[in-house]
Image (cartoon, rainbow, N blue to C red):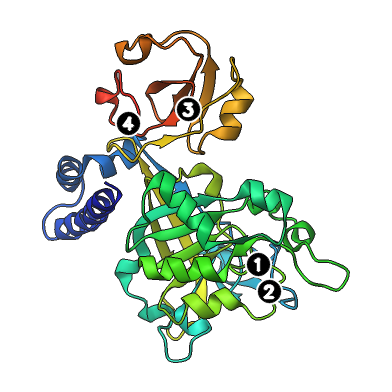
Amino acid sequence: MRGATAVWLATGILGVCAAAWAGGAHRAGAVDAAVADSAFPELAGIRTGATRVVDMTYTLNGHLPSWPGDDKTFETQVVATYAKDGYFARSFWTLEHYSTHLDAPVHFAPGKATLDQIPVTHFFGPAEVIDVRDEAAKDADYRLTAARVEKWEAAHGRIPAGAIVLLRTGWASRWPDQKRYRNQDARGAMHFPGFGVDAAKLLVARGAVALGIDTLSIDYGASANFEVHHVVLPAGLYNLENLANLDQLPATGAFLIAAPIKMEGGSGGPCRVFAILSAGRQFPRQRCPSFRKSKPSRADCVKRCPAGASWKCASARPTSSKIRRRSKPICWARASRPWIATANSCASIWSRPATTQNLLPS
């Protein structure tokens, strides 16, 4: 299901671009929009609000957390003004690896792809989000393990080839406080979570095209040798670091678009990253562990259920005959427009509003 959704979205995005380009040959405007809307209604939903776009990029300026030793990070200079030139323009200078950015394979692998050589198809893919906020809250040096990936797959399905695997650590809550984001000890070593080597090897074997994270690096902060970089970049993957708004994505069902600056020979560079959450297609459903409490609270729902939806608990019996016989309290989960009920558990679903009546998680 996820693979089909990803292919559909990728085809839709490219198709809309093609339709817009073709429109230049005759008349731009309403005709092109109508063609695109009828052919790809879910993407047309971006304009209407039916399809949600999450910006996962921090605004670039010179006052953001940087790698220790990078004292000069970003600067701009005005090169034209309205008063003097009749228009406004600036030049800018920035580090390749600063703020929300992409690591190209050549960053740690001589002879591998530079920023401008990464296959363009790798910039589009299903986002598979592994949530380790609980683990990271207990251990700042937490590293994702292969066993943890397999546990995630047991709940959400095998990570498909072409996926962009994102690690949600919760570290973005510290942005843009550089001291808290770096989390350095008295010796200067940083402490923040990251991917582990065995997990990275497994994700390479799965056919992932990229890894992403909401910290300074895909390696954990105290790493001295960048072990994970040395696993994934030689394998042709790229990395997305310092991602924003990862808390707004569900575990599966979002589609990611990474748009780095196309700089010749770059080891990396600034990258605009978007996630698309479509209400027009039914994405994989998510279920939380059963509640043992007789009356689960809203806090229980928020804690135990996936991100990407608003949650409301209630003890009223559902109207659906499929679960009417069950007397245990339920959690109501709202994702997009529909309200879905399940007995003694939470569920999240993204589906077409016209078909949301009496839907139940499978």
- Residue ID for mark 3: 346
178 left or right, relative to 290: right
210 left or right, relative to 122: right
Question: Would residue 12 be seen by someone viewing this image from the given angle?
Answer: yes
- Residue ID for mark 2: 223
Front one among 21 and 84: 21
Front one among 77 and 189: 189
Mark-to-mark CA distance, 3 and 4: 12 Å
What's the amino acid at mark 2? Ser
Of circles 4 and 2, the one toward us is: 4
What's the amino acid at mark 3? Cys
What's the amino acid at mark 4? Ser
Of circles 1 and 4, the one toward us is: 4
Mark-to-mark CA distance, 1 and 4: 37 Å
* Dot 3 crowding, Cα within 10 Å, few <14, some 14–19, many 20+: many
Mark toward the start of the polypeptide (2 vs 3): 2
Do labels 1 and 2 touch, CB within 8 Å?
A: yes
Instruction: Determine whether 49 is above or below 236 in the image.
Output: above
Mark-to-mark CA distance, 4 and 2: 42 Å
- Residue ID for mark 4: 362
Choose top left, top right, bottom left or bottom right for residue 264: bottom left
Q: Residue 220 has which mark?
A: 1
Choose top left, top right, bottom left or bottom right for residue 281: top left
Residue at left 17%, top 48%?
32
Mark toward the start of the polypeptide (4 vs 2): 2
Q: Position of residue 289 (x, y in %)?
A: 51, 33
Mark toward the start of the polypeptide (3 vs 4): 3
Q: Position of residue 206 (x, y in %)?
A: 37, 65
Mark toward the start of the polypeptide (1 vs 4): 1
Mark-to-mark CA distance, 2 and 3: 38 Å
Mark-to-mark CA distance, 1 and 2: 6 Å
